[in-house]
Amino acid sequence: MTDIFVFDNSYVRLPDRFYARVAPTPATTPSLVRINVDLARLLGIDPVKLAAPEGVAALCGRRIPEGADPIALAYAGHQFGNFSPQLGDGRALLLGELVGTDGARRDIQLKGSGPTPFSRRGDGRAALGPVLREYLVSEAMAALGIPTTRALAAVITGDPVVRETLLPGAVLTRVASSHIRVGTFEFFGSRGDVEALRLLADHVIARHYPDAATQPSPYRALLDAVIARQAALVAQWLMVGFIHGVMNTDNMSIAGETIDYGPCAFMDAYDPAIFFSSIDQGGRYAFGNQPRIAQWNLARLAEAMLPLLADDEEAALADARAALAGFAPCFEAAYLAGLRRKLGLQSAGADDLALARDLLQAMMADGVDYTLAFRRLADAALGPADGETFRGMFVDLAVIDAWLGSWRARLLEEPMEGQARRAAMRAANPAFIPRNHAVEAALSAAVTEGDFAPFERLLAVLSRPFEDQPEHADLAAPPPDGLPPYRTFCGT
Ligand code: AMP
Ligand code: MG
């Protein structure tokens, strides 16, 4: 009889120094919060079996399913600019890999499943609130069309975790194209373990960047491709106001997926300097800094990969520099293409970036909500009378009227009629993002009152972010006035 999962593990075939074999700590009295039925099906898992006791036992460490080979992955990382040569999965285990019905290989990871050799001073646990946050936000990102890890399940363990107070413990089952990070390369790079670097790079090429294998310099092609994917990813974050919050190199997936939703947040009023993380002194990971930080992280990747690029050090450095020079054009192209979609533009005009910047500047000057403004701008595509709601969001009407004039003049250069333009803009500008205050309210109801209804409602609404859902209009609204400044926390 086959188990619920049909594992096909590849990372575990890499040498021992890539990971530590470790069994999960069994949860005492598990209770299922939810499983992700659609994702289960995509992974070739029967959702009914997954939600049954045998499945839940596998999702909380009480049963190691057939074919699973649990390992904690070794990695290093630059955290807030400082290098830690030894991090690794301190509270997560890779159960194994599955090939989905779409043919794609994905990792199945338990997060919060107990201590590992990489736990350092941590308890290896996760609290329910952060598990629900990751579930909610990662699934919202997926629905927004942004590459991301996914959430397959959340289980309450029955074992309280000690934070500032005692909190319910939980395990998130995370699904990712892989859990290989920039920090995985740094782990071997900093040890001068060139053989391991080569094995890792070959694994990553085979798994994520098969085209690189056919290039004259596969490792350089790999570096170029990672840079391009990461640049495109950060541009997509900026389109929806996402602030990752802890863009350390150990939290940057080599596959170009958004990973690690600890202190993440979404921007309400447009402000590139905004950040929310309580441990991010100085706003290193502020909204508008994210492209620069991505590039900085990729420079760490290039450094780690130097021995693979060329035997001669000067030649390797020149290669790394040339690859890194590719970041800015990739990012700028993706960013501008994204802004054009948000503005309802089909063609490429020479002044489009300036047009977008002028709007963002007006939003910033007047503290206008980023998501709502673009959503309302879609209505303005029908004509001036339909632009009043958008216009009314601004304080300085002279500025926004001038801008609307430029925008309308630019629209006239394209044949698209109003309704079609509005539809295209609504497909690029979500009505719903995971608003910080709404996420907090949903998590707080679940954690303090055991009421999961707000969490379920928010999750359902965020699964269709581009559709108006008038009965849930409250979840599209910016935070009410008078809320204290929003803060997020790391390592939770
Ligand atoms: P993060 O800030 O979640 O990206 O984690 C950074 C590092 O700390 C990683 O190596 C994690 O595995 C580890 N870590 C975070 N929280 C815990 C915990 N509660 N127990 C053990 N290790 C942890
Ligand atoms: Mg992490």
Image (tube, grey):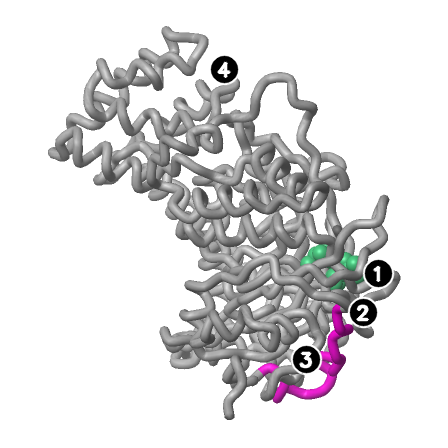
- Tag 4: residue type? Asp
Q: Is mark 2 within 8 Å of ligand 1?
A: yes
Mark 4, other Cα within 10 Å: few <14 / some 14–19 / many ≥20: some
**Is the Cβ of the residue at disc 1 closer than 8 Å to that at disc 2?**
yes
The reply to whether dot 2 and dot 3 touch (C-beta < 8 Å) is no
- Between the residue at mark 1 and the residue at mark 2, the CA separation in whole angstroms equals 8 Å
Q: Nearer the viewer, mark 4 or mark 3?
A: 3
Q: Quadrant of residue 90?
A: bottom right
Residue in the picture at 49% in, 47% down: 459
Q: Which mark is residue 63?
A: 3
Mark 1 vs mark 3: give the one in front: 3
Q: Residue 115's mark?
A: 2
Q: Earlier in the sequence, mark 1 or mark 2?
A: 2
What numbered label is drawn on residue 366? 4
The alpha-carbon separation of the residues under discs 2 and 4 comes to: 48 Å
| Magenta-highlighted residues | 11-27
* Circles 1 and 3 in contact, beta carbons < 8 Å: no
Q: Find residue 180 and report its horizontal and vertical position in percent.
A: 60, 70
Closer mark to the observer between disc 2 and disc 4: 2
Mark 1: is the Cβ under 8 angstroms from ligand 1? yes
Q: Amino acid at mark 3?
A: Arg
Residue 27 got which mark? none
> Which of pointers 4 and 3 lies earlier in the amino acid sequence?
3
Label 4 – label 1 distance at C-alpha: 44 Å
Local secondary structure at mark 4: helix
Q: Is residue 349 magenta?
A: no
Q: Earlier in the sequence, mark 4 or mark 1?
A: 1
Mark carried by residue 122: 1
Give me the residue at 51% from left, 65% from top: 255
- SS at mark 2 in the image: loop
First in sequence, mark 2 or 4: give its number.
2
Which tag, 1 or 3, sits closer to the chain's start?
3
